[in-house]
Image (spheres, rainbow, N blue to C red):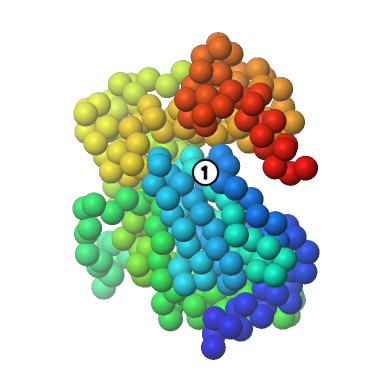
Amino acid sequence: MSKELIKQLVEMNIRDDGMVETGVKGVQLFRVTSPVRCAPAIYEPTVVALVNGSKEAIVNGQRYAYDSSQFMCCPISMPVEAGTPEASPENPLLGVYISLDTKVMTELAIEMDTGIGAIRQPQISHLSPSLTLSHWDESFTEALLRLLRLLENPADISILGEGRLRELYYAVLKGEAGVSARRAFGVGNDIARVIEYLTANLDKPINIEVMATQMGMSRAVLHRKFKQATMMSPIQFVKSMRLNTAAIKIVGGMNVNTAAMEVGYVSSSQFSREFKRMYGQSPKQWIHSRQTDTD
């Protein structure tokens, strides 16, 4: 019943395609009625909860497909390919996009791990924190409903919004996605800090050896921990982030050479080679195929 109420609230507050602000910082509603094939994207720390339709995301060749039976939690910045291949006017994609405030998530995760009566969760060594699909449990569903009910009385948002968003974060950290999210935000979240540094410095030369030393670990340990967290080596991660960021800029109308330089490439020919290796087409061929799809 709570889930149906959430869907009704979303439908009442977004009528057209696109994204709309809710008034709660970092929380948006979205609607898509046209199919969109998977394309390069950058997922920032976020939770995406669908109430209708389905989405796809591909991380380093691994495909994730989810619908209203699961929500997606991505607690670290990740290069992905994402799309909505089954969206239609008859079956629109509807959902809630919740940006994760890293400061608040870190405070909650550390408190859960170290505070009095700390909430412990099983340590699952093979679980990657890069992207997790989690079933809607009662705690998450009720927290999301309480958050979206603020839309019924916008005057409440400024007073109650921050607290109810924090309640939702807590529900995420307690649930199925909590193990991976607490790895990203909790005690010893050194890889999350490395990723934050890398994503902020894509246009600069990256020296993994220096970075490992700064983090107080060997290059081999950094490589192992990084791959556990993201399913990619640090070099693969940087390359994917650079290429996906450039692809997004190109789709937005930026010149190919300019986009390449803005993400740290000094050679346009090297950029074109690596772009084609990643996406199977040269940048010009790729953008032409995207334009053909939308005609």
Q: Closer to the camera, 45 or 128? A: 128
Instruction: Give the amino acid at mark 1.
Output: Glu
Is any atom of residue 173 visible in this view?
no
Q: Which residue is mark 1?
A: 81
> Which residue is located at x 49 percent, y 33 percent?
241
Of the 4 image quadrants, the one containing the C terminus is: top right
Q: Relative to 285, is 69 above or below? A: below
| Percent position of residue 274, x then y | 49, 22
Residue at the (72%, 38%) spot, across then down: 292
Quarter holding the N terminus is bottom right
Within the image, what quadrant is residue 284 found in? Answer: top right
Task: Decide: few, some or many residues near mark 1? Use Cα within 10 Å; few <14, some 14-19, many ≥20.
Answer: many
In the rendered structure, the answer to whether residue 8 lies left or right of residue 107 reads right
For the residue pair 215 and 42, the one nearer the viewer reads as 42
Residue 193 higher or lower than 88, as above or below: above
Q: Position of residue 229 (x, y in %)?
A: 32, 44
